[in-house]
Image (cartoon, grey):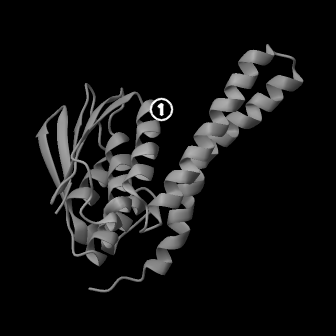
Amino acid sequence: MAFDVSSWIPMLMAKFCHDLASPLGSLGLGLEMLNEEVAHSETTKTLQESCETAQLKLRFYRLLFTYKASLSEVQSVLERLAHLKSIHLEWQGVCLDDDRLSPLLLGLFMIGSETLIRGGAIKIILGTKVSLEYSGSTVQWRPDCLEAVSNRTDALKSPNTRIILISYLHYLGDELNKSIAYESIDRHKFSISIC
């Protein structure tokens, strides 16, 4: 079944802009604090952190939309994102069988990490099958996102701004003859695999 992904561009851009709004808003707040003569070391730290977060998210999206991202680039971005989200990241395996899987790995990390409300752990297993195992004290899926991860057909037929990243990942999987498989282990653990 062919999909017109060109109609997804506005939704992908909305997701992109939404993710950059917070760190850029913090930059603006930091500049206001400088004008109000709040302690400069505190303001400078806030500005620096916000700038680094914005740069990291831009790098994430650049790699997400590039098939040629190396594993070392992906690891660097995911390590930094995990740190920002209070997530312990563990790697098992040393390489991806196909570098074109990098965008899927990045996207699945982001989707799953958003469910770990109070931080947690993600184990990335690289091999013939790529798998991400998530665990946390609080795992909270938005119902539409869980449905989209679990149901490729619906995600591709009816994308919206809340599930557009998931729809895009299913589309990429189709392009690479791969599928995305979700498995709930218990209320604190789940896995998503690329197979």
Taking 161 as reference, is 123 left or right?
Answer: left
Taking 181 as reference, is 55 left or right?
Answer: right
Please give the name of the residue rendered at 48% of the width and 32% of the height, measured from the top-left corner: 84
Please give the name of the residue rendered at 25% of the width and 25% of the height, measured from the top-left corner: 137
| Residue 90 location (% of width, % of height) | 27, 35
Of residues 195 and 95, the one nearer the viewer is: 95
| Residue 132 location (% of width, % of height) | 23, 46
Residue at numbered disc 1: 84
Please give the name of the residue rendered at 28% of the width and 66% of the height, measured from the top-left corner: 98
Please give the name of the residue rendered at 55% of the width and 69% of the height, measured from the top-left corner: 10
Q: Residue furthest front?
A: 94
Taking 118 as reference, is 189 left or right?
Answer: left
**How many neighbours does mark 1 have within 10 angstroms: few (below 14), some (14-19), or many (20 or more)?**
few
Callout 1 secondary element: helix
Of residues 33 and 67, the one nearer the viewer is: 67
Q: Disc 1 residue type? A: Leu
The answer to whether 194 is drawn above or below residue 20 in the figure is below
| Residue 17 location (% of width, % of height) | 60, 54
Q: Residue furthest left?
A: 185
The answer to whether 108 is drawn above or below residue 31 in the figure is below
